[in-house]
């Protein structure tokens, strides 16, 4: 049966498609560039003394941009304040972005071996993102609106389940397939299967990050791919459509490899910038506030862009009164800036916040 966007695409081909679609010099050249950039990023991550410096910063940025792709908008200011303070009045969009971060971090923490990359893990990601108590969809869905259907995924039941089973078979068992090319074809196929009633795009982008960790291409799920997709959103959807309608795997794979390359370079710059200001902050505190310096204090300042008195107390860095004095001293020497949410005072790490807010 020929493809018809208005009818369930039950004939969506199983993976693997014909490998001649990507066994081409231009793809292997792009693959080499992407692998080199990703390897450089992986090697550099070890300089960061505490993984939370990246998890609570870059992952939140990934969550923000991935959600923006689905027209869920928030700001850095709202996002970081809501992440730190339960007294912050959180709007629905900001809550959804925080749920994305939780889904990504939760699945990464549970990824102990290849068997953990499972249907249940994917369902858990969907549930955390959407806060829906559902599993694989049981009804028909379509992409678009009632006036303009863009694509109709396979119908639920045996057809959908078989295609999802094939997806996991390829993800876990086709070890002869280059992992970045595999990630590209898996990402398309997941979007085409559309296994959930909602949140498929965000779930699929989390799976990209988790898959890279599964394949040991990176040690933390901090590859910030949603920024590239957001900046090239029309191309992203056009190429997804072209795979469906004309088997144009070549351009789709080139797009994903470009995304990996540019994202790796961008993320590496962020990691280097964070580490640079981390070292400069150590020097500044030792020089201008030596009496309050400790390694643990500096690390807390970089765990996320905002800090508060209770965190220093919980981390056993200082009593409440002493913590207040520490943070006020750091504000006095220009490292932090304070602001109130209700009666609670939050302290912003100015240099860290600027780096995370910059698109460069």
Image (cartoon, rainbow, N blue to C red):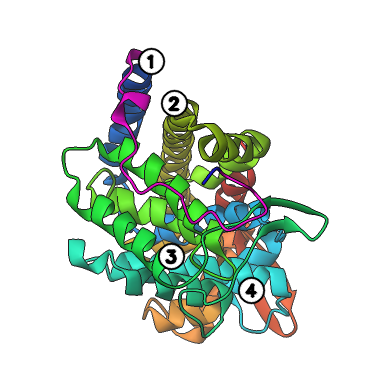
Check disc 2 and report the residue beneath it: 250
Query: From which residue to which does the magenta span run?
Result: 3-26
Q: Mark 2 to mark 3: distance in Å? A: 25 Å
Numbered disc 4: secondary structure: helix
Between discs 3 and 4, the one toward the N terminus: 4
Counting from the top left corner in percent of width and height, residue 224 is at 48, 46
Kindly give the residue lying farthest to the right in the view shown: 147
Counting from the top left corner in percent of width and height, residue 350 is at 62, 52
Numbered disc 3: secondary structure: helix
Check disc 3 and report the residue beneath it: 160
The label nearer to you, 2 versus 3, is 3
Height in image: 232 above or below 9?
above
Q: Nearer the viewer, residue 241 or 219?
A: 241
Height in image: 15 above or below 102?
above
Q: Mark 3 to mark 4: distance in Å? A: 30 Å
Q: Mark 2 to mark 1: distance in Å? A: 9 Å
Left or right? Give the position of 244 relative to 55: right
Q: Mark 3 to mark 1: distance in Å? A: 34 Å
Check disc 4 and report the residue beneath it: 95
In magenta stretch: residue 316: no
The label nearer to you, 2 versus 4, is 2
Residue 240 appears anywhere in the view = yes
Check disc 1 and report the residue beneath it: 26
């Amino acid at each position: 049966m020929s493809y018809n966007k208005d009818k369930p695409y039950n004939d969506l081909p199983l993976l693997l498609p014909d490998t001649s679609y990507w066994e081409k010099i231009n793809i292997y050249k792009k693959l080499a560039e992407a692998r080199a950039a990703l390897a450089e990023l992986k090697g550099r991550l070890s300089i960061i003394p505490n993984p939370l410096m990246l998890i609570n910063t870059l992952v939140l940025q990934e969550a923000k941009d991935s959600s923006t792709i689905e027209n869920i908008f928030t700001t850095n200011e709202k996002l970081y304040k809501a992440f730190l303070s339960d007294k912050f009045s959180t709007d629905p969009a900001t809550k959804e972005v925080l749920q994305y971060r939780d889904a990504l971090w939760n699945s990464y923490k549970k990824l102990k071996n290849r068997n953990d990359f499972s249907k249940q893990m994917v369902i858990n990601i969907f549930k955390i993102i959407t806060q829906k108590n559902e599993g694989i969809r049981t009804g028909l869905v379509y992409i678009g609106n009632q006036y303009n259907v863009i694509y109709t995924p396979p119908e639920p039941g045996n057809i959908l389940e078989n295609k999802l089973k094939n997806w996991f078979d390829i993800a876990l068992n086709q070890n002869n397939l280059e992992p970045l090319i595999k990630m590209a074809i898996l990402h398309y196929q997941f979007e085409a299967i559309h296994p959930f009633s909602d949140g498929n795009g965000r779930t699929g982008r989390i799976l990209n990050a988790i898959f890279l960790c599964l394949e040991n291409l990176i040690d933390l799920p901090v590859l910030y791919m949603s920024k590239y997709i957001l900046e090239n959103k029309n191309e992203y959807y056009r190429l997804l459509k072209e795979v469906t309608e004309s088997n144009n795997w070549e351009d789709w794979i080139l797009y994903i490899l470009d995304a990996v390359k540019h994202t790796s370079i961008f993320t590496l710059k962020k990691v280097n910038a964070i580490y640079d200001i981390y070292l400069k902050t150590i020097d500044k505190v030792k020089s201008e506030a030596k009496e309050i310096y400790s390694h643990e204090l500096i690390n807390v300042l970089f765990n996320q862009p905002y800090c508060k008195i209770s965190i220093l107390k919980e981390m056993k860095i200082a009593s409440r009164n002493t913590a207040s004095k520490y943070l006020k001293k750091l504000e006095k020497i220009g490292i932090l800036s304070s602001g109130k949410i209700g009666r609670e005072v939050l302290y912003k790490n100015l240099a860290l916040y600027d780096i995370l807010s910059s698109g460069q």
